[in-house]
Image (cartoon, rainbow, N blue to C red):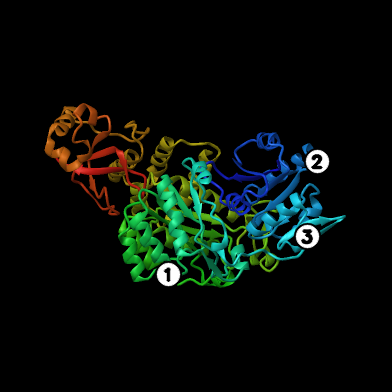
Amino acid sequence: MKKTVIIAINSKYIHSSLAPWYLKAACGQKFGEIKIMEFTINDRVNNIFSSIYQEKPDVAAFSCYIWNIEFVMKIADDLKKALPDIRIILGGPEVSFETVQLMQDNQYIDFILKGEGEISFKLLLNNIYNGQPDLKDIKGLTYRMDDDCISDGDYELINDLDSLNSPYTDEMLNSLNGRIAYFESSRGCPFSCSYCISSTFNGVRYFSLDRVFNELAKFVKYGVKQVKFVDRTFNCNKQRAKSIISWIIENGGNVNFHFEAAADLFDDEMLNLLETVPEGMIQLEIGIQTLNNDALNAIDRKTNLKKVFENIKKLMGFGNINIHVDLIAGLPKEDLQSFINSFNKVFILYPHQLQLGFLKLLKGSKIKREEKLYSYIYHEYPPYEIISNKFINADEIMYLKDIEELVEAYWNSLRFTKTLKFLIGNYFNTPFDFFEKLADYYNKKGLFKRSLSGREKFTVLMDFIQPYIEKNDLIIINELMKFDFLSADNTNNLPKGIVRRIEAGFREKCFEFLKDEKNIKKYLPQYKDFKPKEIIKSVHFESFDIRFGINSEDIAVSENKMLVLFDYNSKSRVTGRYRTAEIDW
């Protein structure tokens, strides 16, 4: 029996791959055994090669992206050497452009499919196994004919998406095993941002809402933890987006749903709907990219920035949705100072995550074609990231790389939220000023060259801020850091540099508190049938020498003392931090 393997090499174990399952579903039972094999770039190349080789496939098809293309090319080359009769098929965005040159440079590649491959892949397997149809009749195919490489130049797009067989089979859903499930309710993008290859195709095509709801119901039934919509702009069709959000609110269970959205397209009706979403059910990724209007015009991006800011503030105020905001460094017409301005204004929205990304000159994108116009220098290998352009030099890009690392470690980790808000608001001119000085400290101490634990980062931060903090305020920083640490770490073992005050008889008071049924009913109702000795294993009491808003965005502090109860069996689905309550005994 003929055997085809479709290989996905993901960037992390937590990720899954959707494209191979679409291809398998399209082929049905007509071409013998079709097996999906998933790996990650953290696997050894030889191990991936060995696993595929042992299958002795007749056809090996690879899904190619910027994160895995180097792996794919090595493995495909070795497979051809070990199994000379194997047919190698490549598909995916990383090989959908300059296909003839790619095949001429790599003789082990037999076929490349450009664009959406469900129809073309099925036809190609039929040609390989049954001799029909003619290769020239398969849209989007690049193939060999004698000594030439032939391409029709087309990029396959499928208009009737509902005609595609669903990839979300029992086999596919069972294979997730706790990983992120990727889902699309549409293909294409209505916008034309020049750095994105989605801009090369006009219009958006949709799956019917009935199909969308049926497939989402499968994820809920299987208990999938997170469903990540890969729609380029989920809410470009406002009414459709509201219908999907409404369905999720009613039927989404405990699944978390992640969307890429344009914040300026949220109207009052959508905002009112989002305010009713159960805590942590939805994550929104909002691409701002830059606040520089010249840069926005240069990349053909149309954004109502005033509306973006207004809506993000409202969404953050709801407190029930995790908000992730993106900026891109290296855009045309934006120098370092302009980027810093964008960073500062976006940061003080205090999104849960702020991704500082760097421009990539992707194959097929308009900005790649404009590389000479803006004097781009970039890495010639994936992910084709910027080194410099005429507006920002290499030193400045490398400098922003340091800032990116610290934003990821100290802000996006959600482990220092209270501390950083207070520090930036009271002791540094701007958010960037804080991260800039922290980066200088890291460089002086050689800390970028070390791998620091989460605990060590607290100690480093405490050491770093000493010259900037008035002596009387050190107690405030200590208490905020203590709260941040205990909200994210259940060991109760404070990092070096953070101190606690323990009153005589404190532990006995904790037990007395837990013996009172009124306290359990008010603060810990989920423990109503547990004994105090059992409850104490899952909770923690901590006294603080100042008072501040522990469950709000408020960072105002007062000299009043407070007692906080940490529940280490309950986390916020928005921030991932342990739930807390101010108590009084």
**Mark 3 is on which residue type?**
Asp
On the question of residue 412 being in view, the answer is: no
Label 2 crowd (10 A; few <14 / some 14-19 / many >=20): few
> Reading the chain from its start, which is encountered first: label 3 or label 2?
2
Label 3 crowd (10 A; few <14 / some 14-19 / many >=20): few
CA gap between label 1 and label 2 equals 52 Å
Relative image position of residue 55 (x, y in whole percent)? 68, 36
Between 195 and 493, the residue placed more toward the observer is: 195
Front: mark 3 or 2: 3
> Helix, strand, or loop for circle 1?
helix
> Reading the chain from its start, which is encountered first: label 1 or label 2?
2
**Mark 2 is on which residue type?**
Pro
> Helix, strand, or loop for circle 2?
loop
Front: mark 1 or 2: 2
Between 390 and 531, the residue placed more toward the observer is: 531
> Reading the chain from its start, which is encountered first: label 1 or label 3?
3
Mark 2 highlights which residue?
A: 84
Q: Which mark is residue 238?
A: 1
Quadrant housing residue 268 = bottom left
**Mark 1 is on which residue type?**
Lys
Front: mark 1 or 3: 3
CA gap between label 1 and label 3 equals 43 Å
On the question of residue 2 being in view, the answer is: yes
Between 413 and 496, the residue placed more toward the observer is: 413
Say which residue appears at 15% left-offset and 31% top-offset: 509
Asked if 497 appears above or below 77 in the picture, the reply is: above
